[in-house]
Amino acid sequence: MAAMLGAVIRRKIRVLKAFFIGIPHRFFFRWIFLAICIGIVVGFTVTIFHFTVEWLSEILLEEVPEKFHIPYPYVFLIVTPMGCGLAGLIAQTMASEIKGSGTKQMLEAYHEKLGLTRKRVPFLKFIASAFTISSGGSAGYEGPMVQIGGGLGSIVAHELRLRVLERRVLMLAGVAAAIGSVFRAPLSGAFFAVELPYVYDVEVVALLPCVLASAISYSIYASFVGWEPRFHTLQLEVTSIEELGLYAIEGVFLGFIAILYSVIFEKISHMFEKTKLPLPIRCALGGFLTGLIGVFYPEVMGLGYDTIEETLLEPKDMERLFIITILKIIATSLTVGSGASGGLLAPAIFIGTTAGGSIGLLFKDIVPELVDHPSKFALVGLGAFIAGAAKTPLTAISLVGELSGNYKLLVPLMIASSITFTMSGRVSLMEYQVRDRSKSPLGKLAEMNLNGVRQ
C-alpha cells in the first residue's frame, strides 16, 4: 500500500513539474529576474498614476468648480467633456492605440503583433487616462494599466532582444503587475493576466513570472497607499444549503446583465464611429452625455468606489440600485465607447455589486427566512459579473476575497460565477480574446519557440 501511494505521489509530482523539467534553468532565472524588474517598474508607475489622478481630481472637481462657482453636480457638464476631449486629442495627434479601454489594443499586440508595442504608448496612455478618470468620466484604472503594464513589459523584452515567446510572457507579467497593484489583489492580478488572452484557456507558461511580478508590484503600491483590502465589508457566510439556490438564480440574472453590458457597449461604440466626427469631438460628446447622466445620478461618475463600498456594507433602495446599474452601463459605454481612455473592469465591479445588491434586496422581500443580509449577494455579484463579462472566472473567485478580505462566501461565489460565465456564452468585454491557444495567430509560433528552448 505504501509503495502504491508513493508511486501515485511521484506521478503527480512529475505532472506538476513537467513544464519546468523541460526547460533549462537559465531561462527561468532570466524570466524571474525580468519579472522582478517589471514588477518594480510597474509598481512605481501605478503608484504615480494613482496620486496623479487624485491630484487632478482635486483640481478639476473641487478647485475649478469653487473658483468659477459651478454648483455640484453640474460641474460634470463642463469638466467631464473637457477631460475626455483632451484624452481624445492626445490619441488623435500622438498615438491612436491609446483610445478606448486599452485592453483591446494590448490583446491585439499579444495575438497579432508579436507582442510589440510602440514605446510612446504606455506614457501617452498614462496621461490620457488620467484626464478621463480625474474629470469624472465613467471608466476605471485597469484598462489603462493593462496597456501600460503590458507595454512596459513588451518594451523591456524588445530592448533585450528576447524571442517572441519571452516577449509575450513579459507582456503578461506587466499586465499582472498592473492589475495586482491597482486592485491590491496580487493573486488575482496573476490569474487575470494568464486568463485574459483566451475565453476558454489560460497561458500557463506565463504563470510564474506573472505571480512574481504581481507580488512585487503590489508590495510597492501598498507601501504607499496601504495594505488593507480595497473595500471594507462585513464578514458574512452562508447560513443554509437552501440559500445556495438563490445564488444560482443570481448567476442567471447576472449572465443577462453581462450580455447587456457587452451589447450596449458595442452598439454605442459603433454609433460613435459612424458619426465620422474628429476623435476629440466624439470624446467630448461622450463626456457631455455622461455628465448629463451624472447630474441626476452622480453615483455613476468616476470609479464609483464609494457606492461599491456602501452597497457591500448595506444595500438600500432596490429600485435605485437597479437604475444606477443600467445607467452605469450606459455612462461607461458613452465614456469609453466614444474613444476616451479608460477601463471597463472597474465599472464592471460597480455593475456586479449594484446588480447583486438589488437582487439581494428582492430576495429579502420574497424569502426573508433565507436572506439574513442582502449584502452577501452584492459581494457575490461583484465576482460573478466579472466572470461573465470578462471571461476570467479564476480571477473573479480570487478577486472577491482579496478586495474584501472575506473568503467565507467562496462556495456561493463559485456557483454564481460558473452560471454567469456559462449564461453569457462567448460574449466578452475584452475584444481580441480568442477561444483558446490553438486559435491564437501567434500560438503555434510561440509553441515553436518553446520547443526550441526545451531542446
Image (cartoon, rainbow, N blue to C red):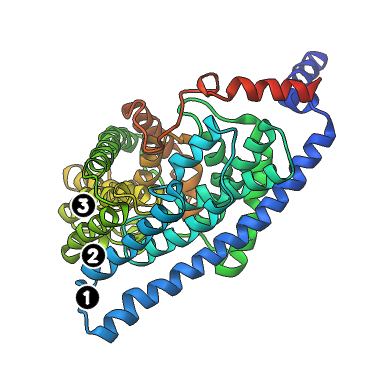
Mark 2 vs 1: CB contact within 8 A: yes
**Counting residues from the N terminus, which is met first, the one under dot 2 or under dot 1?**
1
**Counting residues from the N terminus, which is met first, the one under dot 3 or under dot 1?**
1
139 and 211: which is toward the camera? 139
The type of residue carrying mark 2 is Pro
**Label 3 CA crowd tier, 10 Å (few <14, some 14–19, many 20+):** many
The type of residue carrying mark 1 is Tyr
Asked if 443 appears above or below 80 in the picture, the reply is above
**Counting residues from the N terminus, which is met first, the one under dot 3 or under dot 2?**
2
> How far apart are the alpha carbons under marks 3 and 1?
19 Å
Pointer 1 residue: 72
Residue 35: percent from the left, percent from the top?
Answer: 70, 46
- Residue in the picture at 55% in, 68% down: 225
Q: Is residue 407 visible?
A: no
The type of residue carrying mark 3 is Leu
404 and 394: which is toward the camera? 394
Q: Secondary structure at mark 3?
A: helix
Pointer 2 residue: 298
Residue 42: percent from the left, percent from the top?
Answer: 61, 55
188 and 400: which is toward the camera? 188
Q: Quarter-wise, where is residue 413 in the image?
A: top left
- Residue in the picture at 36% in, 38% down: 429
Residue 258: percent from the left, percent from the top?
Answer: 30, 37
**Label 1 CA crowd tier, 10 Å (few <14, some 14–19, many 20+):** some
Asked if 336 appears above or below 55 in the picture, the reply is above
Pointer 3 residue: 327
- Residue in the picture at 41% in, 37% down: 430
